[in-house]
């Protein structure tokens, strides 16, 4: 008998995310995808046991960072359409089928944006919004430098997104940590790929700890802009 062809792959990214996993696993629409697995970087808070007990496949990650996790996911995934979900409370699992159906319309990448009409980002209720402002500044720079489509991207940084595996491979990403999503957005613009966004409501972190420290992460973003300018000038990467 021929095996069912896997078209869509859901990747769940974890690094000590037990509280988020416990709270969210029942809301993840596994039936909306053909394949799913967890890519885990050395969790020691019970995440691995929790996932295994639910019969979900775990792909262990050897080297740290979301960039590594994304590349590992793409090399393991059997689907043509990939969606990345982080179970820390920021992302609404109900967006998973929305991202995939938008992607299936013919886009190369679809981002869940925290900055569109109908969106919300976690700082919206605050007066002082350093993360949102930094995000918008990096997004503005990327659009000015690389977007030639006439339609700007509103959230170049959010990790909640879906992408065609073929597009992911064409990007030849090198970022290891949190800058990977920004690099994906920049390269999509540089390569003239078709990018779309859907509005998303960003929730608060459910538990555990943030692994993204603002200052070092910001500096990695600045370094990435400089290296992407360099590769743009050289014309190859
Ligand atoms: N597989 C894998 N997942 C990771 C790694 N680093 C972070 N993650 C996961 O990626 C998601 C996002 O990480 P966060 O630390 O929440 O980063 P953030 O969303 O920018 O920051 P906060 O939500 O404010 O804490 C979470 O689900 C983490 O568990 C990694 O090296 N490997
Ligand atoms: Mg988060």
Image (cartoon, helix red, strand yellow):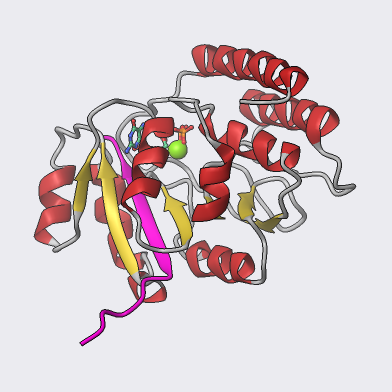
Please give the name of the residue rendered at 61% of the width and 13% of the height, measured from the top-left corner. Answer: 223
In the rendered image, the vertical position of residue 151 relative to residue 3, given as above or below: above
Q: Position of residue 47 (x, y in %)?
A: 18, 44
In the rendered image, the vertical position of residue 83 relative to residue 180, given as above or below: below
Residue 54 placement, left or right of 212: left
Looking at the image, which residue sits at the far bottom? Answer: 1
Residue 152 lies in the magenta-colored region: no
Question: 176 or 15: nearer the eye?
Answer: 176
User: Quadrant location of residue 29?
Assistant: bottom left
Residue 58 placement, left or right of 159: left
Residue 2 lies in the magenta-colored region: yes
Please give the name of the residue rendered at 58% of the width and 39% of the height, measured from the top-left corner. Answer: 171
Q: Is residue 41 visible?
A: yes
Q: Give the magenta range.
A: 1-15
Looking at the image, which residue sits at the far right? Answer: 150
User: Quadrant location of residue 14?
Assistant: top left
Q: Position of residue 112 (x, y in %)?
A: 60, 52
Question: 226 or 121: nearer the eye?
Answer: 226
Please give the name of the residue rendered at 82% of the width and 44% of the height, measured from the top-left corner. Answer: 152
Q: Position of residue 231 (x, y in %)?
A: 68, 20
What is the number of callouts on the image? 0
User: Quadrant of the image for the C terminus?
Assistant: top right
Residue 117 placement, left or right of 26: right
Q: Position of residue 75 (x, y in %)?
A: 35, 47
In the rendered image, the vertical position of residue 22 relative to residue 171, given as above or below: below
Q: Is residue 202 visible?
A: no
In the rendered image, the vertical position of residue 10 relative to residue 121, given as above or below: below
User: Quadrant of the image for the N terminus?
Assistant: bottom left
* Ligand 2 quadrant in view: top left
């Amino acid at each position: 008998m021929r095996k069912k062809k896997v078209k869509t792959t859901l990747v769940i990214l974890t690094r000590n995310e037990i509280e988020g996993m416990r709270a969210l696993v029942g809301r993840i629409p596994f039936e909306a995808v053909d394949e799913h697995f967890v890519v885990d970087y050395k969790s020691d808070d019970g995440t691995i046991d929790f996932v295994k007990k639910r019969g979900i496949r775990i792909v262990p990650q050897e080297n740290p960072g979301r960039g590594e996790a994304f590349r590992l996911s793409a090399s393991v995934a059997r689907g043509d359409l990939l969606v990345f979900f982080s179970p820390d409370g920021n992302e609404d699992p109900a967006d998973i089928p929305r991202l995939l159906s938008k992607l299936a319309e013919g886009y190369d990448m679809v981002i869940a944006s925290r900055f569109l009409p109908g969106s919300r980002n976690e700082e919206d209720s605050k007066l002082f919004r350093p993360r949102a402002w930094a995000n918008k500044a990096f997004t503005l720079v990327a659009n000015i430098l690389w977007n030639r489509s006439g339609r700007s991207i509103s959230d170049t940084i959010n990790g909640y997104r879906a992408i065609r595996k073929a597009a992911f491979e064409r990007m030849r990403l090198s970022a290891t940590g949190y800058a990977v999503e920004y690099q994906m957005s920049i390269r999509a613009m540089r390569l003239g790929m078709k990018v779309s966004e859907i509005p998303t409501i960003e929730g608060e972190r459910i538990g555990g700890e943030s692994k993204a420290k603002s200052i070092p992460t910001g500096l990695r973003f600045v370094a990435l802009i400089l290296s992407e300018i360099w590769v743009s000038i050289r014309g190859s990467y």
